[in-house]
Image (cartoon, rainbow, N blue to C red):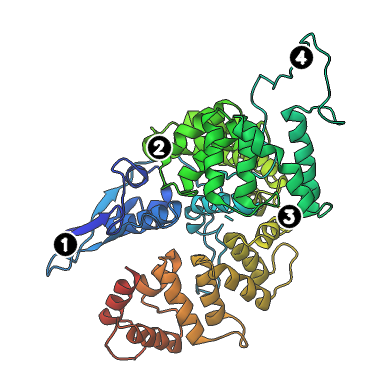
Amino acid sequence: MTNKVRQFVSSGDANQAVSDDGLFRELFLDAINGKDPRADMNGDGYILGSELGLYLDQRVSNLTGNSQTPRFGKLRAHGFDLGDFVFKVPSQSISPEPQEREVKTEDAVPTPAPTSIANQELLERIAKLEKLLQAQQLDNKTPPQLTPAPEAPVPSKSPDTSSEQPTETSGTTGEEESPSSSEPDATIDKQLDAFFDAKEKFGRGDITKDEMVKASLFLNDASMSGDDKAQQELGVCYWDASCGFEKDEQKAVRLIRMAAENGNAQAQADIGWMYYNGNGGYAVDIGKAAEWYKPAAEKGIASAQNTLGYIYQYGKGGVAVDEEEAVRLYRLAAEQDEPNALNNLGYMYSFGKGGLPKDLKEAARYYRMAADLGHTIAQWELANFYFDGTGGLEKDQAEAARLYRLAADKGDATALNDLGYMYRKGLGGLPMDENEAERLYKLAAEQNQSVAMYNLAHLYEYGSATKRDPKAAAQYFLKALKLREQRTVDLLINKQGEQLSALTRRHIQELLRDEGYYSGSIDAKFGSGTKSALLTYQN
């Protein structure tokens, strides 16, 4: 370009702590070195500064759950805002990522697209999976994790990772033994077995609260005597009030910490989880989380292996990036049928990471195992494979629709959008149903799913006569623009809204005016004033 320009791309917003060797740096280098073809949004072999900024903003914001939100733009200086930086993309022989598809068009107007069709779909996957894992921990539910996250204290029997069992007193003192009760003395292990049995019955409502408390009383004495398994289980009882006790988080953390310091593997994993998520009175500290996850992982706790693998994969908390170690840990957890680890191995095979070959068949195999265990993101990933007919699978849109529905029924925003798209288009044996598409798009949009916002706007702009609503279309186009949805940016800014009805363009100008971004005429003409308002609104 011969025009002068001063452009900027920041790694985050004001007051956001970022690392100079973190995710932003990795994605920046991947973009300009041609390792991620999505950065070149029009596929012309060159990445403009504006394309790079939009790519980094979308990727980093989504992968960090908006805890790091890059900003980009041109400095407002006369004569220095006309051009654009240009990076020539090195030639690569990389094929498109498995869930990415070309956006189809119909009748020269923008078409609705499922997230799996959009460049956006992969951007949201990791953040969604991370959110998914955090929600799973305390309430045993499944949101979105395109990638792993830590596990919380589990209200079930902790794995016995010790090779030593509590010993019984022999009673051979030369004196006649006098039994203290009619019941034989039980070891801690036997008491724990009875406790777990009672806890299961209590969860089903088969025994009363008083009976559950009575079955738990031995834990207090055993904890005071230093038994780490009793300390761990009593801590969980207070953490989630699952044993008839009143919830007491401070007491729970003290007990779990005691058990962890006494070498209890599950307790070590739980303390790691608390540091990872900032729970239990601990501030978020990924480095300390990793310190606690390591011994738990070595002792075979699958959730610790999975989350420690994630820490190594992305170099969190000052831990050096080591994708091969991440794969090793994922495998250990996957051998125990840990759903998140199975999903993560599928992801690593999808993109050939961690020393693994890019192998979509193997990725599909791991996604299927995780999906069969109810893993939401794996269900969505496998649905994409069936939608496209990749990974050695025959194209089967009916099976894709079934899997999207499984994930959508658990509230996954991306799956809700994709299922809505299939209803809009009448794919996979589903009827063409604008009402159902609208309902599903709205559920996804309520979770800030940007492609669903675009699809809703598209429905209100181009749907049947009973669905057309220019004002609603304008509202959702602006919401999608705020989240930098790629097609919306192209439609409103690059193409100046030329494919929209005049009434929708007027509503957009009115909304921009009402929010203080635009002071020009409401004339449905997207000139320089409207474009400037849209850019300011977007940024």
The residue at the far top in this view is 174
Q: Residue at x 76, y 10 (%)?
A: 173
Query: Marks 3 and 1, Cα distance to the nearest angstrom?
Result: 52 Å
Query: Marks 1 and 2, Cα distance to the nearest angstrom?
Result: 46 Å
Q: Secondary structure at mark 1?
A: loop
Q: Is residue 492 above or below residue 329?
A: below
Q: Is residue 465 above or below residue 387?
A: below
Residue occupied by mark 2: 287
Q: Residue at x 67, y 58 (%)?
A: 404
**Does the CB distance between marks 3 and 2 fall below 8 Å?**
no
Task: Classify 10 Å Cα crowding around label 2: few (below 14), some (14-19), many (20 and above).
Answer: some
- Work out whether mark 3 precedes mark 1 in sequence or the reverse, and give the earlier one: 1
Residue occupied by mark 1: 3
Q: Residue at x 74, y 29 (%)?
A: 189
In percent of width and height, residue 190 lies at 77, 30
Query: Marks 1 and 4, Cα distance to the nearest angstrom?
Result: 91 Å
Q: Is residue 496 above or below residue 388?
A: below
Tell me, for residue 170, which label it has, or none.
Answer: 4
